Image (cartoon, helix red, strand yellow):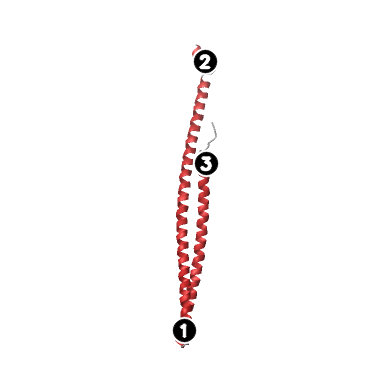
Amino acid sequence: MKAFRFPLESLRTLRQQREQATQQHYARTLTLCDGAARVLQLAEMELLTGHALLQSELATGASAARIINLQTWCKVLELRRNECAAVLQAAQTEASEAFRALTAAARDREALDKFHEKSLRAWERTLLSAEQKMFDELAIQNAGGPLWQTAFSN
């Protein structure tokens, strides 16, 4: 009997490659999320430092020009923090989409893998059946040998 050959093997390979590509894309998006989260954390720390400096200057009675400069600087820091938060949100959205693509690719590959396994089991059952049939035929031929002939020749 011929060796097992899965007719959709090329599609199975393509799905495995697609799943690997989506895994790599998902890993890159998670790395981007981590980086964006660190940048946001730094921006928030910088903003807190700016607010603390402003409070300190207000408490010590700094000049109006110094207070205005610090308030303007704090507004710049708030804008930077908001931009970082938006970048993080976009990165998280991209990571979420990449995860959905990854699960879809894995589901597609798993479905084809199950079909492959089912086909392989069916081929193995057919092989076992053919072997059993061959053994049965050999047993019948051997039974028709000298003992069978002597029993019917009398």
Task: Name the N-terminal-most of marks 2 and 3.
Answer: 3
Return the residue at label 3.
Answer: 9
Q: Residues within 10 Å of mark 1 (few under 14, many from 20)?
A: some
Q: On screen, 96 above or below 61?
A: above
Evaluate whether residue 53 shows in this view.
Answer: no
Q: Amino acid at mark 1?
A: Ile
Instruction: List x then y, in percent, for residue 20.
Output: 52, 51
Q: Nearer the viewer, residue 66 or 136?
A: 66
Evaluate whether residue 99 shows in this view.
Answer: yes
Discs 2/3, front: 3
Q: Residue placed farthest to the top in the image?
A: 154
Q: Amino acid at mark 3?
A: Glu
Instruction: List x then y, in percent, for residue 56.
Output: 47, 84
* Disc 1 from disc 3: Cα separation: 71 Å
Q: On screen, 140 above or below 105?
A: above
Discs 1/3, front: 1
Q: On screen, 133 above or below 32?
A: above
- Secondary structure beneath label 1: helix
- Quarter of the image with the N terminus is top right
Q: Residues within 10 Å of mark 2 (few under 14, many from 20)?
A: few
Residue name at image x 47 percent, y 59 percent: 94
Return the residue at label 1.
Answer: 67
- Secondary structure beneath label 2: helix
Task: Name the N-terminal-most of marks 1 and 3.
Answer: 3
Q: How many marks?
A: 3
Q: Residues within 10 Å of mark 3 (few under 14, many from 20)?
A: few
Residue name at image x 51 percent, y 44 percent: 12
- Secondary structure beneath label 3: helix
Q: Which mark is residue 149?
A: 2
Residue name at image x 47 percent, y 65 percent: 88
Q: Amino acid at mark 2?
A: Gln
